Image (cartoon, rainbow, N blue to C red):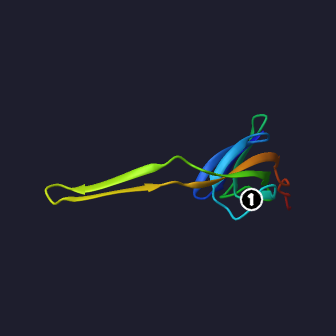
Amino acid sequence: MYAIIKSGGKQYRAAAGDTLDLEKMDVSVGETVELTDVLMIVDDGQVKVGAPVVENAAVIGHVLDHVKGEKLYVFKSKKRKGYRRKIGHRQKYVRIYIDEIKPGAEAEVQA
């Protein structure tokens, strides 16, 4: 079973036992995180697609660490003007271990 989740404007594939690096969140190490923006769940060939999210579904995990990505450099220049700027950026991430995926309740049919 795996799920496609949305966090920080990006989409991730999450399965139980996976480790994900998500955009920085205000959670401390060891704290439990519940991600409720589940876009799709695949379980033994059965696919549940949300519109836009799957109802009552969640991905549960706990925070392992706060990490930084690799350093990216941006260099700007203008020819024949003597203008040069070099700046760097390091994105901050939260490393999360996925404990379980809750598929949510089945929709009830009303007659």
- Quarter of the picture containing the N terminus is top right
The residue drawn where x is 84% and y is 53% is: 106
The residue drawn where x is 78% and y is 46% is: 98
- Residue 68 placement (x, y as % from top left): 59, 51
**Residue 58: which quarter of the image?**
bottom right
Total labels: the figure holds 1
- Residue 87 placement (x, y as % from top left): 39, 57
As drawn, the residue found furthest toward the bottom would be: 26
Q: Nearer the viewer, residue 95 or 68?
A: 68
Q: Secondary structure at mark 1?
A: loop
The residue drawn where x is 82% and y is 46% is: 99
Q: Which residue is mark 1?
A: 36
- Residue 71 placement (x, y as % from top left): 49, 49
The residue drawn where x is 64% and y is 47% is: 12
As drawn, the residue found furthest toward the top would be: 44
Q: Residues within 10 Å of mark 1 (few under 14, many from 20)?
A: some
**Residue 52: which quarter of the image?**
bottom right
Answer left or right for 101 relative to 39: right
Q: Nearer the viewer, residue 108 or 57?
A: 57
- Residue 22 placement (x, y as % from top left): 64, 52
Answer left or right for 58 relative to 78: right
- Quarter of the picture containing the C terminus is bottom right
Q: Nearer the viewer, residue 110 or 90?
A: 90
Answer left or right for 12 relative to 82: right
Answer left or right for 23 relative to 45: left
Q: Amino acid at mark 1?
A: Thr
Q: Nearer the viewer, residue 105 or 110?
A: 105
